[in-house]
Amino acid sequence: MTLDLISFVLGAALLVIGLNGGGIQAKEITIPAIGTSIRIGASIFGISFIILGLWLGNRFEQPDINPENTVQPSTPTSASEKILFIARDQLGANQKKEKITLFINGAQAGEFKVDSTHPAASTSIKVPAEGDYPYALSGYVDEIDNEDEEVKRYSIVGQGTILITKGAIFEFKVKGSSGSTIELELTPLIARPLRASSLRDI
């Protein structure tokens, strides 16, 4: 027998006693007659126990939900998968040191430093989706002059647009030079086909 049922039965019995005033005999149970004040008290306690029984029953049927223990549905971090591609740099034959900073869509995406000790560098870059992205390059390169064998520093510039697809690999190529400035471009070494689901404007 549950606590709510005990409370309800006890309250009902007290309420009957309060209303009838006692004098009840059922088999071996005899309830003597009681006075008015006791009848009023029994009625009040009977109603209280009945209300308590109903409240306990409702509480057991609908337990409190603790929000701290409730498993919340996971929120997706992004509607589309991030696209990863690789850009890499290689030290040239007459070069001693090179530093290139790559900007994608106006934000710095990677920095490449190569020298005689570390002649190659690469970095993985993530973009929101496949498609065309503007890029810009800045930096410098120290080269050995063929005539006097002196090391001269040249500024590096470059800009353009590249088609980025998942798993593509790009590298830097010399596009031209003017005075102490060398213009580079980012060219695809491995270009994968653009997925149909990504054919949209960036």
Image (cartoon, grey):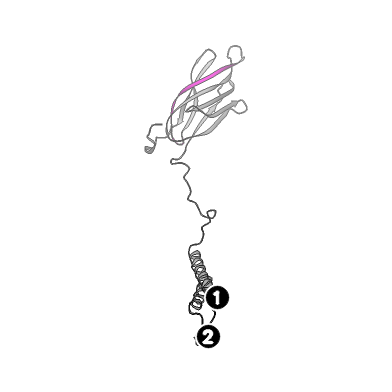
| Front one among 50 and 172 | 50
The answer, for residue 201, to whether it is visible in the render is: yes
Q: Which residue is mark 1?
A: 37
The answer to whether the residues at label 2 and label 1 have Cβ atoms under 8 Å apart is no
Residue 72 is situated, as x and y percent measured from the top left of the image, at 49, 51
Badge 2 marks a residue whose secondary structure is strand
Residue 35 is situated, as x and y percent measured from the top left of the image, at 54, 79
| Front one among 92 and 105 | 105
Which mark's residue is nearer the viewer, 2 or 1? 1
Q: CA distance from mark 2 to mark 1?
A: 23 Å
Give the residue type that dot 2 points to: Ile
Give the residue type that dot 1 points to: Ser
Tell me if residue 144 comes above or below residue 163 in the rendering.
above
Task: Assess whether residue 160 is covered by the magenta stretch.
Answer: yes
Tell me if residue 21 comes above or below residue 138 in the rendering.
below
Residue extent of the magenta highlight: 152-167
Task: Assess whether residue 91 is covered by the magenta stretch.
Answer: no
Residue 142 is situated, as x and y percent measured from the top left of the image, at 59, 19
Badge 1 marks a residue whose secondary structure is helix
Q: Residue furthest bottom?
A: 27
Question: Crowding near pointer 1: few (<14 within 10 Å), some, many (20+)?
Answer: few
Tell me if residue 67 comes above or below residue 87 in the rendering.
below
Q: Residue at x 53, y 16 (%)?
A: 181
Q: Which residue is mark 2?
A: 29
The main secondary structure of the magenta stretch is strand
Q: Earlier in the sequence, mark 2 or mark 1?
A: 2
Tell me if residue 123 comes above or below residue 176 in the rendering.
below
